[in-house]
Image (spheres, rainbow, N blue to C red):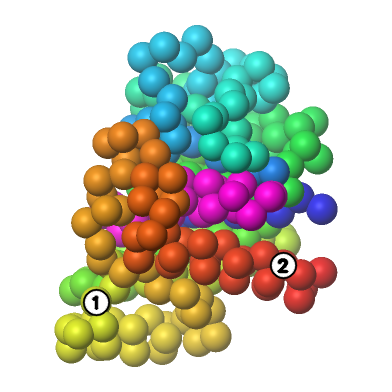
Amino acid sequence: MTKVIAIANQKGGVGKTTTAVNVAAGLGKLSKRTLLVDVDPQGNATSGVGVDKRSLKLSSYDVLVNSEKAENVILSTPYDNLDVMPSDMDLAAAEFEMIDLEHRSTRLKRALLPIKNNYDYIIIDCPPSLGLITTNALTAADSVLVPIQCEYYALEGLSQLMNSVRYVKRKTNEYLYIEGVLLTMYDGRLNLTQQVVAEVKQFFPKKVMSTVIPRVIRLSEAPSYGMPIMYYDKNSKGTLAYMALCEELIRREQNNG
């Protein structure tokens, strides 16, 4: 069975795209056939796996707006078992263009259906907003992984995300659930970090992932080389953390299955 995980948080700078890229690449490294779906107009997940956005003929925009077949848009990457459905700036206009389209909330789900069985995991990098594109991602997903940074205002805006999840459950995807909350930019030496962790655990009892992602400079360097962290520096703390997270996700899936 294919597992589809949307990575979402409308707050920017929480490690959302870093998580999407490195979870997708890490699962691929663990021999899971993986598709990274980039539906963020910034296209950072696309360039994060070494794809040049300027050379794209088709992107997720064409899938969402022009009903292009997913198989015509998906590209292979230089990384083990990892394909990508790329994104570019065209997607910025998609929210408006989709308003009058038929099946506007289920277009991504419908597009992924024919190719879904080619993969063990599909990871969707959502835009940092809660509009129609994120609704499409949540409708197509089995679960949502929510990265939260260990900083002030970490929980700010999360009630809106939970409202969106509830809305999608009610309207288009009754089986959607919270995969977990992932603490990013973690520094155990700081009192603030401990406060945020306690707060998050209170807000999401039993949903906080065991793995935490440390604040390490290598994680912010890797994207500029178009490389997931485990290929950029295989001994980095960031690599160990994201590989541990991938193993945790696989373990959960096996236990649920």
Tell me the residue at 54%/37% (across/down). 79
Asked if marks 2 and 1 touch (Cβ < 8 Å), the reply is: no
- Residue 65 position in % (x across, y down): 55, 21
Q: Is residue 183 visible?
A: yes
Find residue 40 and report its image quarter: top left
Camera-near label (2 vs 1) is 1
- Callout 2, which amino acid? Glu
Residue 18: in magenta span: yes
In the depicted structure, whether residue 103 falls above or below residue 19: above
- Residue 12 position in % (x across, y down): 28, 52
Foreground residue among 251 and 60: 251
Tell me the residue at 35%/60% (across/down). 236
The crowding category of the residue bearing disc 2, from other C-alpha atoms within 10 Å (few below 14, some 14 to 19, many at least 20), is few
In the depicted structure, whether residue 46 falls above or below residue 221: above
Residue 227: in magenta span: no
106 sits to left or right of 186 = right
- Residue 68 position in % (x across, y down): 64, 17
In the depicted structure, whether residue 115 falls above or below residue 53: below
Foreground residue among 99 and 206: 206
The secondary element bearing badge 1 is classed as: loop
Answer with mark 2 or mark 1, whichever residue precedes in sequence. 1
Per the image, the residue denoted by label 1 is 187
Tell me the residue at 39%/20% (across/down). 52
60 sits to left or right of 49 = right
* Magenta-highlighted residues: 9-32
Per the image, the residue denoted by label 2 is 253
| Quarter of the picture holding the C terminus | bottom right
- Callout 1, which amino acid? Asp
Alpha carbon separation for disc pair 2 and 1: 28 Å
54 sits to left or right of 154 = right
Find residue 42 and report its image quarter: top left
